[in-house]
Amino acid sequence: MRFEGPAEAAKKDCANEKKAPGLLQDILALLIKIFVILTVLVLLFTFLFGFMTMPDTSMQPAVQAGDIVLYYRPGKEYIASDAVVLEYGGKQQVRRVIATSGDTVDITGEGLFINGAYAADQNEQEILLPANGAVFPVTVPEGHVFLLADHRDGGPDSRMYGTVAVDTLQGKVITVIRYRDI
């Protein structure tokens, strides 16, 4: 066993202090990690995902007023029943895809018909038509979709503004975070 003198012990303590990071270095490392995480989140929510707060009751009962809607931006292929986010009149809104390219939509006093078949899954007999809206039947052109609000009297949809180009849609709804007195 070797005995260390005071000089050797002091040298060892100085070497340990140089190797151990100081409080300032720990804080700096933490700030860098926080910056990297925030940068990744900003990039994700700029290019891959988006979110909005539902402004009205036009999509009740699926989406209530005040709910937070998370949507996926890159997807540009939609099927009937997808909920999508679009901008109309300077405001974001959520609407449901009822028909896609090549489908024929007809709204009569008897209800909603897609490609000549009664859309029984829509469970409605009468859909109001606005005075200055689309003329039915409508065949959805290539690269377009036909959108309706779930609560048909709740807001503007393709009955008013016609078919919507897929390229103008902001994304497909992937989840709804229910507002509960947050």
Image: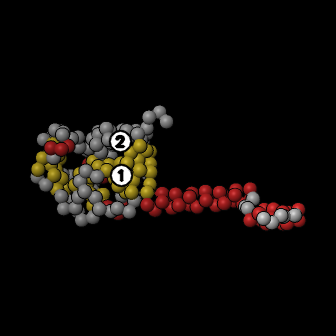
Q: How far from the left and from the top, in percent, is residue 118?
A: 12, 46
Does 182 sit left or right of 75 as displayed? right
Observer able to see residue 158: no
Q: Amino acid at mark 2?
A: Val
Q: How far from the left and from the top, in percent, is residue 68?
A: 43, 44
The residue lying toward the viewer, choosing from 172 and 109, is 172
For image coordinates 39% across by 57% down, the residue present is 72
Which secondary structure lies at badge 2?
loop
Which residue occupies the extreme front position in the image? 1
Label 2 CA crowd tier, 10 Å (few <14, some 14–19, many 20+): many
Q: How far from the left and from the top, in percent, is residue 112?
A: 17, 46
Q: Are marks 1 and 2 in contact (CB under 8 Å)?
A: yes
Does 46 sit left or right of 163 as displayed? right
Q: How far from the left and from the top, in percent, is residue 156?
A: 32, 46
For image coordinates 56% across by 58% down, the residue present is 37
Q: Which residue is mark 1?
A: 173
The residue lying toward the viewer, choosing from 155 and 76, is 76
Q: Amino acid at mark 1?
A: Val
Does 98 sit left or right of 19 as displayed? left
Q: CA distance from mark 1 to mark 2?
A: 11 Å
For image coordinates 69% across by 58% down, the residue present is 26
Which residue occupies the extreme top position in the image? 181
Give above or below for 154 relative to 73.
above
Does 136 sit left or right of 14 as displayed? left
Q: Which residue is mark 2?
A: 63
For image coordinates 80% across by 66% down, the residue present is 2
The residue lying toward the viewer, choosing from 154 and 65, is 65
Observer able to see residue 8: yes
Which secondary structure lies at badge 1?
strand
